[in-house]
Image: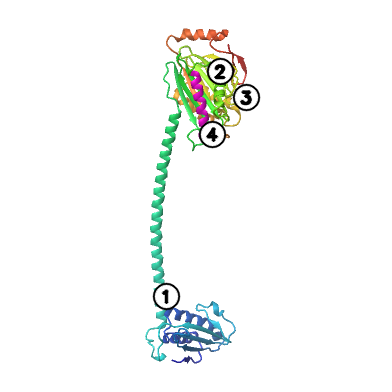
Amino acid sequence: MTERVRRSGPLADLAAVRRAVRGLAAAHGVPVETRARLAVSAAAVARPSLVLGRTVRLTALHVPGDGRSGPRMLSVRLDHAAEAGPPPEELPLPAAADDGAVVWDIPLSVPAFEDPAAADVTDDPAEQELAAVLAASDALTADHQRLKDELDETNSGVLALYVQLEERDEQLRRAHGQMLRALEDALRPAPLRVPGLELAVHYAPADTDAPTGGDLYDWFVLPDGSVHITIVDALGHGVRSTGSALNVTHAVRTLALDGCPLKSVVGRASDVLNGIDPDLMASVLLARIDPATGEMLLANGSHPPALVVRADGGGEFLEARGRGVGYPLPGSEQVLSTHLAPGDLVVLYTDGLTESRRDPLEGERRLISAATMHARSPIEEIPGALAADMHTVVLHADDTLALTLRYTGADGGAGAAARAGDEAGTGHGPAAGRGTARGPRGLRAGIG
């Protein structure tokens, strides 16, 4: 097989250029899409010359392949005189420049007609190209729809997975909450039902993701019928501080049940725990109440003072001096004794209640005001109400414990209460020492 050359005559307009290009391409079996690109490219190259009134010529060289030197090729050359025009490499069908001409080398896969004039040109080439464009567009539309359907299916799967993950996360949160509540219940002492006393407590950790912190309480009835209450604030937050606070409450309970004098309990507990955990530091407040008489004894180790709101509306802080567990020279320096009349309210708490605004004295003033306002509320509502009032503004988050006790009196206890008051007044009561009271303005007065 030999090379075949076909040349057009002078082409004077774009329509003639497009017809010639399409005829040559169709005759040599050029694919429709390539033919369309070739026609658009040839028209773009010829336009500047035709605008100037010049003609262009088209030459097609068919090079048959022999299986060794490469595939069959159709080389289309467009001779034009204009220097202007788009760069050949940027045409819809890229070409090469060749001395006043543009050349397209097109590989052929379909056998060319032996006689180009015998090619079937009954169909309009433009319509064939339009049909090819429409088919390509339809194929793109179908691909786009398929991709959209796949995306919708993927999104549905992702959404279903997200819903499943949310449900699983909610299940884990519920299980976590149940576990934390169970842990909190295990750490709390059993509720006390003692005639003459009403007790309630509120606790909130500084870290909402932690079940407990370093603030802990304990209460129990001693063999003589008096009620012992321990308030502990261990250094730190989280589970480790909870362990420290538990060690303190257990040591205090053991010593108290063993008959250790109240004044010595804090110091003895510090000595015992120093061999177990030398780094443990905790403030401790101990209260012991006789339900029959209303007498209350207080021992303190570096802890905020107890607050008493009297039935007549007066309020005072009862402060016994001392140093906490793990402190230098630990122990309560004194035991403070006071008498509770029916209707008196006692508030025992940790510093997280009064120091949320970083001013302890200002916090104590607000606490007296809040406690006085809620003193006649049901006992179970008071601790939470105090915490809510005290934490309207929180500049320093800390574990918070508020325990409230109301003395309601006991049958036949009026005379005993009076006697206890007389003993406290003469300094001969059960108290091991004399204490001080601080009123709302911080003034101190001797008790006893």
Q: Which residue is drawn at 50% across and 77% down?
A: 92
Give the CA separation, mark 3 to mark 2. Answer: 15 Å
Q: Mark 1 points at which residue?
A: 133
Highlighted magenta segment, given as a residue range:
236-256
Amino acid at the residue labelled 1 = Val
- Could you tell me which quadrant the C terminus lies in? top right
Q: Name the residue under label 3.
A: 328
C-beta proximity under 8 Å, tags 1 and 3? no
Q: Which of marks 1 and 3 is in front?
A: 3
**Image quadrant in which you'd find residue 33:** bottom left
**Image coordinates for residue 334, horizontal then vertical, percent:** 59, 16
Secondary structure beneath label 3 = loop
- Could you tell me which quadrant the N terminus lies in? bottom left
Q: Which of marks 4 and 2 is in front?
A: 2
Q: Mark 4 points at which residue?
A: 237
Q: Which residue is drawn at 50% across and 80% down?
A: 41
Secondary structure beneath label 1 = helix
User: Which badge, 4 or 3, comes first in the chain's sequence?
Assistant: 4
**Image coordinates for residue 201, horizontal then vertical, percent:** 47, 26
Q: Which disc is residue 264 wearing? A: 2
